Structures are given as C-alpha cells and as structure tokens.
Image: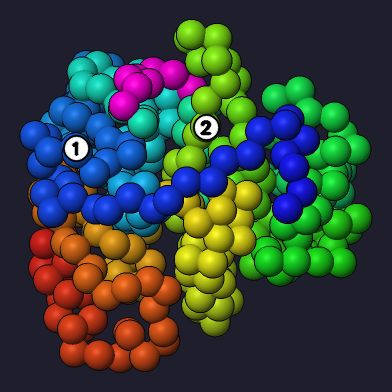
Amino acid sequence: MIKSPIGFNHRSPRGAAGKNAGKAENAGAALFYCRDILKTYEGEPVVEGVNLDLPGGGLVSLVGPSGTGKTTLFNVLAGVDRPDRGRIVLGGEDITGVSGRVSYMMQKDLLLEYRTVLDNVILPLLVRGGKKREAREYGASFFPPFGLAGYEHKYPRQLSGGMRQRAALLRTCLQSDGTPPAAPDGKGRSTPVILLDEPFSALDALTRRTMQDWFQGIAAGGQSPLGNRLSAIFITHDVEEAVILSDRVYVLEGRPGRITAAFDVKAPRPRSRDFSLGPGFAALKGEILTAIGV
C-alpha cells in the first residue's frame, strides 16, 4: 500500500447502524450525526428540528421535493454555514460550524480545466501541505479502481461526464483521507465522512446506472483512499437510486424542511441489478414516494 503523502493512513472497521438512527436520543452507533438543526435566512426558517445519523461505513440518502432545504442542510453539515440552533458531532467531537472536517462534493464536478486530471484530484493533499511528487504518486494509485487509469495526464475536457464525476469523487475522498487541517486542540484528525449532493444527476440514465454499480463496488471493496470505511450521505431526487445505494433513506419535506420519515433498506450491499426487480424493492419505493407525497 502506498503511504499517504502526508504520512498518515487510516483504516478502521465498519460500524453497525442503530435501529432508531433518526431519533435524537440514540446516537450510540453513529459516527456522524446532527441534532435539532435549525437554519434560518433573513429570519425565515429553512430547515428545522433535523436529526440525522450516519454509522461508520454506512450510506444514507436524503430525498424530498425541491425547495425543502436539502442543500442548506448540507452546507450546515459541512460547516459552510453555522446553524441557528443544534449541534453536529463527528466521532464524538462537536464540530458545529467547523469547516474542513467533512468532505463535500457538489452537483457540479468543479474540475479546473487548466489542470490535468491527476493534478485536479490531488488538490486537497496539496492544500494540506503535501509534496506534489508524493501526492501525485499517492493519488495515481487510486486511478485504476476509480476507472481512470491512463487519464492521469489528460484534461477534464477530454473526459466523459461519468469519468469527470469519478475524478471529482476521488478528489473528495482524498480530502477526507489522512490528516485534515488542525483541529482546535492542534492535533490532526481523520475525516471519514463525505457529503454527495446529487453526484450522478447530470448523467444519462445508462451512465448513471453504471456509476451506481461502480460506486457500490468502491464502497464495499475498500478501493477508495478511505479503505472499507467509506461513509456517505447522498442528496438525490431519484428514489430508486436512494434505495439501491443506501442503508437508510431519510425524507425531508415541508417549509421549513423537516425529517418526516426514515426507511431502512435491509438488503446487504453491494446490491445486484436484480435487486431493483424484486417486489420488496417496489414496495419500499412506493412507501417512500407516499411519504414524500407523490
């Protein structure tokens, strides 16, 4: 295994999801959670009373109509915005309003067109003080499992939409790998949580399904810089995608947005394509759509 260019590599076992992960009183199994989040803009609440849990190694989704505050909530979870009320905890540490502790991949890949794909991917390592040569070696080691082998020295304009998203996701994983900016106590900390805001929404249907299959393999196979502990929260408007990828699906609706329902997906990951053809899949999808009000 190639050592991280900042001299710090983490691997940890997957945690178990709590049975009542959406309830404020139980965070025993959660690596990352938020409690009673309220965020207002110009005096108007956008999200209110939000409780959400992510176990170590878990994948959860956030679904709901447009305009219910999903992206606002992500900005709060990522520390981009501070909530008016509530707290956010990572690994037992309160990180409310602290940026850089949770990685965030937005809808657009935001790749810099004047940098090669490899140099785009390693940006988080360089920002944290890594040496370029070591960062390139380390980042390039993940190009094969991310389906990017041979494209290290290409430019973003030479990639397909799916490949651009893979590069953006690898960059996000590298942001969470190793030692992030110093915590308040001056010690480096691991940030094994990533937030994905509709990462596959801009892709055509066939590419999107291919990317879903690929992502499941990355998450289950320990082929990311985070090993087998890839822990992620998705925003998606696609209920089928939420069920295919997630251990738990949260429904955010209303104005202000509130978590109104949570559904466990009990099938083990990674899930085969046949999973979406079964009666259980259709029934769960129907329950979630009903909860959304569709």
Instruction: Tell me residue 164's x, y (percent).
Output: 69, 59
Amino acid type for the residue under numbered disc 2: Ser
In the image, taking residue 180 as reference, residue 6 lies left or right, namely right
| Mark 2 residue element | loop
Task: Report x, y in % for residue 284.
Answer: 17, 75
Identify which residue is drawn at 81% across, 39% down. Answer: 135
Q: Is residue 161 left or right of residue 210?
A: right
Residue 255 percent location from the top left of the image = 16, 39
| Quarter of the image where the C terminus is located | bottom left
- 24 in the magenta segment: no
Q: Which residue is mark 1?
A: 27
Q: What residue is shown at x 29% (from left), y 62% (from top)? A: 247
**Residue 93 in magenta?**
yes
Q: Quadrant of residue 291?
A: bottom left
Is residue 240 positioned above or below 166 on the image?
below
For this view, does 152 lie left or right of residue 221?
Answer: right
Q: Regarding mark 1 in the picture, which secondary structure is present there? A: loop
What residue would you read off at disc 2? 190
Disc 1 marks a residue whose amino acid type is Ala
Write the start and end of the magenta stretch as one range: 92-99
Give the class, few, some or many, for how many residues have Cα within 10 Å of label 2's Cα (few <14, many ≥20): many
The mark that comes first in sequence, 2 or 1, is: 1
Residue at image coords 18%, 83%: 280
Residue 52 visible in the displayed image: yes
Residue 103's place in the image compared with 138, above or below, is above
